[in-house]
Amino acid sequence: MSETQQPPDRSSFMRLIGAAQVPAPEGKVWVRLPHMREELLNQLPAAHGGVVMALLDSVMSRACAQQPGAPSQTAVTVEMSSRFHRPARGPLLAEGWVVHASRSLCSCAAELRDEQGQVVATASGTFKYWLAPTTWDSRE
């Protein structure tokens, strides 16, 4: 399925910034931000740090939810550490994967790359599986 045929993203925030999950290899999650709108820029201009962190956070949370046997399709951030390596410009691709998962918590890592494949930011985080209903659940 091409990017243009992807269903709407579950996250209204990802839809707001124009990012969406795209097909990835087994064990990985990819979220792509194909266009860097002016509203998403800082003064450099490059992607605002909040945009960078949101992309990294999103792929890690989604990686938890896609684990075989995951107790929930939603995982919320407990803690996250981010490192900014260079300005994030142009189209971006975030990749996340699980490092370790238990019944309630999941540890992940992620990296964000620019169109040239350069790593612009990395992150690690811990996520808790959310067992209560979500707004997305009420739509299904």
Image (cartoon, rainbow, N blue to C red):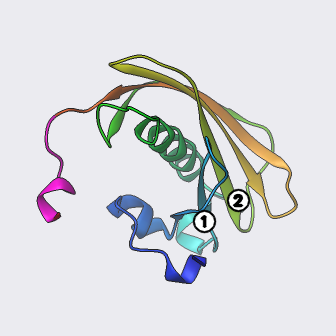
Q: Classify residue 24 as left or right of residue 54.
A: right
Element marked by disc 2: loop
In this rendering, does residue 104 appear at all?
A: yes
Q: Quadrant of residue 114?
A: bottom right
At label 1, counting other C-alpha atoms closer than 10 Å, the crowd grade (few under 14, some 14-19, many 20 or more) is: many
- Structural distance between the alpha carbons of marks 2 and 1: 13 Å
Is 99 contained in the magenta span?
no
Crowding at dot 2, Cα within 10 Å, few <14 / some 14-19 / many 20+, comes out as some
Report the label total: 2
| Secondary structure of residue under mark 1 | strand
Q: What stretch is highlighted in magenta?
A: 132-139
Kindly indicate whether the residue at mark 1 contacts the one at mark 2 (C-beta within 8 angstroms).
Answer: no
Which quadrant is the N terminus positioned in? bottom right
The C terminus lies in quadrant: bottom left
**Badge 1 is on which residue?**
33
Residue 137: say if magenta.
yes
Q: Nearer the viewer, residue 11 or 132?
A: 132
Find residue 10 and report its horizontal and vertical position in percent: 34, 61
- Rendered residue at 34%/18% (across/down): 103
Quadrant of the rendered structure where residue 28 is? top right
Residue 27: % across, % down: 61, 41
The answer to which of 62 and 123 lies nearer the viewer is 62
Q: Which residue is drawn at 81% across and 64% down?
A: 115
Give left or right: position of 129 versus 112: left
Q: Is the magenta stretch mostly helix, strand or loop?
A: loop
The disc, 2 or 1, on the residue closer to the chain's N-terminal end is: 1
Residue occupying image coordinates x 71% and y 68%: 91
Could you say which disc has been placed on residue 46 in the image? 2
Query: Is residue 81 among the parts visible in the rendering?
Result: no
Q: Which amino acid does label 2 sit on?
A: Ala
